[in-house]
Image (cartoon, grey):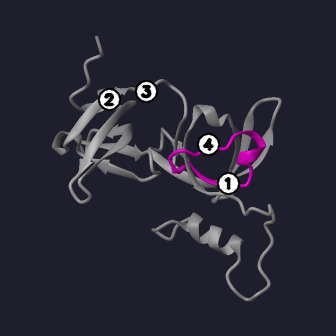
Amino acid sequence: GAPHPPISGAGAVGWRVLLYWPADCAWHEAEVLSHDESRRQHHLLYMDGEEEWAELGKERLVWLHATRHGAVSAGIVRGEDVPKGRDAVGWRVAVYWKDDRTFYEGRLADYEPSTGRHKVQYADGEQEWLALRNERIIWRLAPKADGSSSSSSDGGSSADEDEEALLQGSDGEA
């Protein structure tokens, strides 16, 4: 039979769930990323790229299954494929750091075919090479279609400025 779903706590980490949102009268799929015992809340990543902390014991939900270790990609429109290899270079993404229990914003700057790893340049200046297939990724913004990254000359905001504003996030911190 199917494994018995956890009731609460750290045992829920790694499970896929459906949560009911009364605001739109719909069920939304999410993965439980982590658990904070002091707050009695779980960090959820929804498949549309949204994330939140919630007290699962107070939510209307359905336990789906435990996820396999490996990547979870969110923020891609249903029916579209997750970018792979060189096609992913230029994308703005958020990468989940389990130990910090948060996503960090960055840009996929390069790809090394021999290792299958992408170079992530984070907004804080840090960089690392990652095998995206092993990571929790939110795909934020595709590169411009023409592949350029230069500023606009028409006096309006450039794509780089728009992307920088996106990296600043809602709390104004990079």
Q: Amino acid at mark 3?
A: Thr
- Horizontal relation, residue 24 to residue 107: left or right: left
Task: Find the distance from the CA under tag 1 to the CA under tag 2.
Answer: 30 Å
Provide residue 26's location: percent of width, then percent of height. 27, 50
Q: Nearer the viewer, residue 157 or 79?
A: 79
Residue behind mark 3? 67
Residue behind mark 4? 82
Label 4: state its secondary structure: loop
Q: Amino acid at mark 4?
A: Val
For the view shown, which residue lies furthest in the left direction? 58
Q: Which label sits in the foreground, 1 or 2?
A: 2
Residue behind mark 1? 91
Q: Is the C terminus in the top left, top right, bottom left or bottom right quadrant?
A: bottom right
Label 3: state its secondary structure: loop
Q: Residue at x 81, y 37 (%)?
A: 112
Q: Earlier in the sequence, mark 4 or mark 2?
A: 2
Residue behind mark 2? 64
Badge 1: residue crowd in 10 Å (few <14, some 14–19, many ≥20): some
- Horizontal relation, residue 36 to residue 75: left or right: left
Provide residue 16's location: percent of width, then percent of height. 36, 33
Region rendered in magenta: 75-94
